Amino acid sequence: MTYRSICRLFVALALTSALSAQQDVAAPKRPVTKLKALVIDGQNNHNWRKTTPLLRATLETSGRFEVDVATSPADKQQLATFAPTFSDYDVVVSNYNGQLWPEAAREAFSAYVRKGGGFVSVHAADNAFPNWKDYNLMIGVGGWGRRNEKSGPYVRWRDGEIVRDAGPGRGGSHGRRHEFVLDVRDREHPITKGLPPRFLHCADELYDRLRGPAKNLTVLATAFSDKKTGGSGEHEPLLMAIDFGRGRCFHTALGHDPTAMKCVAFQVTLVRGCEWAATGAVTTDVPEAFPGADAVVVRDPLVARSK
Ligand code: ZN
């Protein structure tokens, strides 16, 4: 290298570092990258055509997510080709309760979560796949589908602590729909940190008697399932966080229908649960309008998005 070319190289290097220093100062603050969520629907004993748009709008209006939807075909032959690319997403949100996915999709989904992908189970998604072992480890507890004591214990809040009850009995039930209070049982978890200790949820099914492997499961909030409304007489887990491999799963048993999903208690816990499942942290604030224990707060995310 000649003296001249060495000089040129130094000038070039000096210019490059000056430029990058200038860019550091002048560059506008980068917008926060949105997390990618995939909502799965297409089969459910609930009205997924009505509820998926509400899930989508709730996530989108949080400003934290961009959302795609994968609608599984109901036809058995076509379902055999159902193969979403889970690994393109930070979090997969299930609004699905239907036929077993083909083996390739099941294996891809297990691998995705095991390697660190996020998963969120909404309401009847915890009814799905009673015999798929990994799925039940991800949801922690589930209902119906002939679940019973062989599926794992009930998980209840009794006398100030979480108790796993392996006694015999069906898995999954609910009483009449009504408004009910959620009691936060873990106030330090990123999903529930900053929420009031008790808050009222809009009329919804209060799932009770869920049971499953309940491994690596943290109960975030329970609600009392009163026998007067056809419930179990127990404090039932309705918001849960579950570790599966390196992946994080959030299970909300709330969200039977649009009335339940237009509830701010549902929406805020969903968004925070999705963010935690995707990243392990929660950055979204608890809105001032979040309910306390005395009155529900209603917000239609479709109207909010159109504004
Ligand atoms: Zn329901």
Image (cartoon, rainbow, N blue to C red):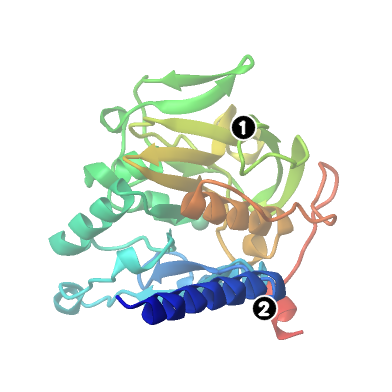
Check disc 2 and report the residue beneath it.
Answer: 302
Q: Which quadrant: the C terminus?
A: bottom right
Percent x, y for residue 256?
A: 55, 58
Secondary structure beneath label 2: helix
The amino acid sitting under disc 1 is Lys
Secondary structure beneath label 1: helix
**From this viewpoint, which residue is outermost toward the front?**
3
| Distance between the alpha carbons at the discs numbered 1 and 2 | 35 Å
Percent x, y for residue 143?
A: 39, 43
Percent x, y for residue 37?
A: 47, 67
For the residue pair 261 and 257, the one nearer the viewer reads as 261
Q: Residue at x 48, y 50 (%)?
A: 277
Which circle marks residue 227 in the picture?
Answer: 1
Q: Which quadrant: the N terminus?
A: bottom left
**From this viewpoint, which residue is outermost toward the top?**
159
Q: Residue at x 42, y 68 (%)?
A: 38
For the residue pair 100 and 274, the one nearer the viewer reads as 274
